[in-house]
Amino acid sequence: MQKTDVDWSYSTEPQRFSSKGFWNHIQKIPRGKGLGGSGQINHLVHSFGKPEDYKAWPRGWSHADLLPYFKKVSDIMNVMSSPEEEYLAQAFLMAEESLKLNNVTLQKGMYTTKRGSRWSTFNAHLQNAWNRKNLHILINTLVSKVLFKENLNADGIKVIYKDGSVGNIAARKEVILCAGVINSPQLLLLSGIGSAEELDKFQIPVVSNVPEVGKNLFDHLLLPLYVNLQARVSITLYKLQTLPEVLNYFVFGRGWYATNGIMAMGRANDSGVMLFGMGSTDEKILRSLSNYKIEHYKSMYPSYDNNSREGFLFLSYCLQPKSRGSISLRSNNIRHHPKIDPAYLQHYDDVLCTYGAINFALQTLETPKFREYGANVHHPDLEECRHLPQDYRDIEYTECVLRVGALTSYHVCGSCRMGTDDRAVVDEKLRVRGVKRLRIVDASILPSPISGNPNSVVIAIAERASDLILGRTFN
């Protein structure tokens, strides 16, 4: 689904502190373009992070406050887990008793599917409301601006229709932006809400000077550790192409095609790992989607194009990165992608934190079941790092590999931060500061990272937002 007409196909600005193994130091940032948003193209991983993640969030947004919504989301999103017969997941879960780490949590991979098909908010929410008389859906329509009256009330939106014509749609009560972490700040800026200095550069009249619009951008940057296996326990292209596997999916909606490949997940303090259970995949597709340079891809993923190669990836990452980037305008044209700068690895603590995640993965490989499978981690022979000992236990080598080969996990959030302070973009009721009748409900409002995939958290935020808008308390 990535790089198709249902993907916005964004790219970052050239990265200063990372991405040296990618063409022009640029990472690809796919975002869903259609009903259901990024849930139509992402990995659908189900996670709510840790209770501590929400301690710094405003009043009314603690883990305890959100727990009823987490339960509701878990019910309606049809949460599934990796198959019982998945050997790698079993080996991972068995490792917990052998790990010499604190605060370890290991679990099977969880994702939102139904009978082997994707299950997004489109399926869980929109389809059920499709025929409501008070719901009107416009497809192939681009919102270009939020309109305001002189009293700073959001009065409606300006849209561009498929044929290029322009129209205004009035709002009787409120305008609610759910455009996502990239498009929501872009829309605010084009509507005159943001840093007055930035707006002046593009001759955009200032409606409200809110300097933090587009700031506070964060993402999980992950390092894929390729692990060689001697045992035949991983997913390979050869196994996927067998007739029984194909029939199992198309007849029963089961098997490897019915999963997202994430067999297990774990965290220890602020270190996280995901076990992606494929030993081989299509090289051209993965290189195209990731933007890796050819030689760097081949070094990071040895013989990954060997259809029968047994192995898996440990996706190692820092759960609570400190680096903060930004979304800013490239022009005053809504069709021009904004500048996206996650500033990956700008803060050195993110290197140390990811080093801890890699150590977590390496310790797991030393446990009995993984030794039985002949698990052996691959150390990339990168040109930029050849002056260092090729060993992930060496911090300098690990930092070098990180700055060359780590890639986005597609968890960009935070560009319209929620908070009670004067600099926050939205308040605790998700109302945009400085104007009236305008809210934001999407991943951009997250004040800080979630220790895991944010997909289900964003859905829970939307559920809570609906109660806030209606002025009711969750029952």
Image (cartoon, helix red, strand yellow):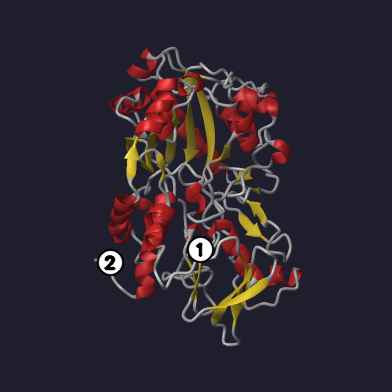
Mark 2 or 1, nearer chain start: 1
Task: Classify the position of the C terminus by image quarter.
Answer: bottom left
Residue 300 against residue 5 in the figure, above or below: above
Residue 200, position in %: x, y? Answer: 73, 72
* Quarter holding residue 306: top right
Badge 1 element: loop
Q: Position of residue 53 (x, y in %)?
A: 39, 52
* x and y percentages locating residue 91 in the rendered image: 34, 23
| Residue at image mark 1 | 178
Residue type marked 2: Phe
Please determine whether, in this image, residue 384 is positioned above or below residue 470.
above
Type of amino acid under label 1? Cys
Look at 40% across and 21% down and name the residue there.
244
The residue positioned 59% from the left and 57% from the top of the image is 182
Quarter of the image where the N terminus is located: top right
Above or below residue 128? Residue 78 is above
